[in-house]
């Protein structure tokens, strides 16, 4: 598994600690202590894949909120995925979590 940076924002792919989803179910995410920039965003990528320069499978902006919750509607195949919090419309990864579709 790739090494990701340790990050100061708290980030979870589920506000209730859920890490597994059935295919087609939206992924719930929550975060605290994010920078709150206009274009901070959350993206979903295949686990182990490149996040720099690759298009996310799905994404959602945080709406400049330093803390919040949202769902990301995405139809994913069975497998493991990285859900990351990214800085202000860049590929800079601030925090990361994993989910499994099964």
Image: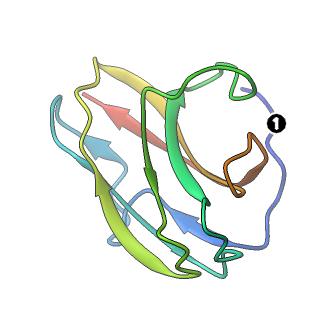
Residue most extreme to the front:
38
Report whether 11 appears left or right of 57. Answer: right
Report whether 63 appears left or right of 41. Answer: left
Q: Which residue is mark 1?
A: 3
Q: Residues within 10 Å of mark 1 (few under 14, many from 20)?
A: few
Comparing 65 with 45, the one in front is 65
| Residue 53, above or below 92 | above
Comparing 37 with 56, the one in front is 37
| Residue 38, above or below 100 | below
Determine which quarter of the picture holds residue 48: top right
Comparing 28 with 63, the one in front is 63
Which residue is at 67% across, 49% downward? 89
Report whether 13 appears left or right of 28. Answer: right
Q: How many marks?
A: 1
Location of residue 46 in the rendering, given as x and y in whole percent from the top left corner: 52, 23
Quarter of the image where the N terminus is located = top right
Location of residue 2 in the rendering, given as x and y in whole percent from the top left corner: 77, 28
Location of residue 50 in the rendering, given as x and y in whole percent from the top left corner: 70, 20
What is the basis of the colouring in this image? rainbow
Which residue is at 57% across, 26% downward? 47
| Residue 66, above or below 22 | below
Quarter of the image where the C terminus is located = top left
Location of residue 35 in the rendering, given as x and y in whole percent from the top left corner: 71, 75
Which residue is at 22% across, 46% downward? 26
Question: What secondary structure is marked by label 1?
Answer: loop
Which residue is at 43% across, 26% downward? 57
């Amino acid at each position: 598994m790739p090494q990701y940076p340790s990050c100061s924002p708290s980030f979870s792919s589920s506000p209730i600690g859920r890490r597994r989803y059935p295919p087609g179910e939206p992924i719930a995410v929550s975060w605290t202590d994010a920078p709150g920039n206009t274009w901070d965003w959350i993206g979903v990528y295949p686990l182990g894949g490149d996040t720099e320069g690759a298009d996310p499978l799905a994404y959602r902006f945080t709406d400049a909120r330093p803390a919040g919750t949202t769902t990301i509607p995405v139809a994913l195949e069975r497998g493991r995925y990285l859900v990351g919090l990214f800085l202000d419309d860049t590929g800079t990864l601030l925090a990361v979590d994993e989910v499994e579709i099964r």
